[in-house]
């Protein structure tokens, strides 16, 4: 059941990852590195996408979406 919910919401973390890479990448180029985990853009993007995926799975579970 969890695997099905995870697969149903796989687009959300992918979009979050790309969006964070673009958004924080632009911000990092301008010299503002505040808010990056360990000073790493990639680590921050991965963490944000994992959090988004977990939230999406929980929301899909609560709403009761069906495959």
Image (cartoon, rainbow, N blue to C red):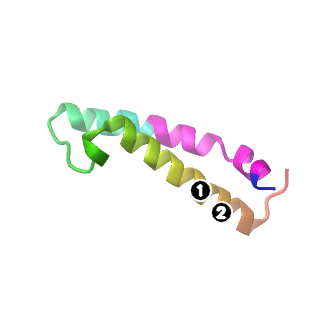
Residue located at (59% from left, 56% from top): 54
Q: Are marks 2 and 1 in contact (CB under 8 Å)?
A: yes
Instruction: Find the residue positioned furthest to the right.
Output: 67
Left or right, 49 with respect to 33, comes to right
Q: Mark 1 points at which residue?
A: 54
Q: Position of residue 34 (x, y in %)?
A: 20, 49
Judge the density around disc 1: few (<14), some (14-19), many (≥20) Cα neighbours within 10 Å: some
Classify mark 2: helix, strand or loop: helix
Which residue, as the protein is rendered here, is positioned at the far bottom? 62
Inspect the magenta stretch and tell me whether residue 24 lies in it.
no
For image coordinates 84% across by 56% down, the residue present is 66
Residue 56 appears in which quarter of the rendering?
A: bottom right
Instruction: Kindly report the distance in space between the C-alpha atoms of the residues bearing marks 2 and 1.
Output: 6 Å
Residue 47 rendering spot, x and y as whole percentages: 44, 47
Which residue sits at x=20%, y=42%?
Answer: 33
Please give the range of residues in magenta.
Answer: 3-18
Q: Residues within 10 Å of mark 2 (few under 14, many from 20)?
A: some
Asked whether, in this view, residue 12 is left or right of residue 49, the answer is right
Residue 3 in percent (x, y) is at 76, 49
Task: Please give the label number shown on residue 58.
Answer: 2
Where residue 24 appears, as percent x and y from the top left, is: 31, 39
């Amino acid at each position: 059941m969890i695997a099905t919910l995870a697969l149903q919401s796989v687009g959300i973390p992918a979009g979050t990852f790309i969006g964070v890479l673009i958004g924080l990448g632009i911000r990092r180029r301008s010299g503002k590195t505040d808010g990056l985990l360990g000073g790493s853009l990639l680590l921050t993007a991965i963490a944000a996408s994992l959090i988004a995926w977990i939230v999406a799975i929980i929301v899909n579970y609560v709403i009761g979406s069906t495959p």
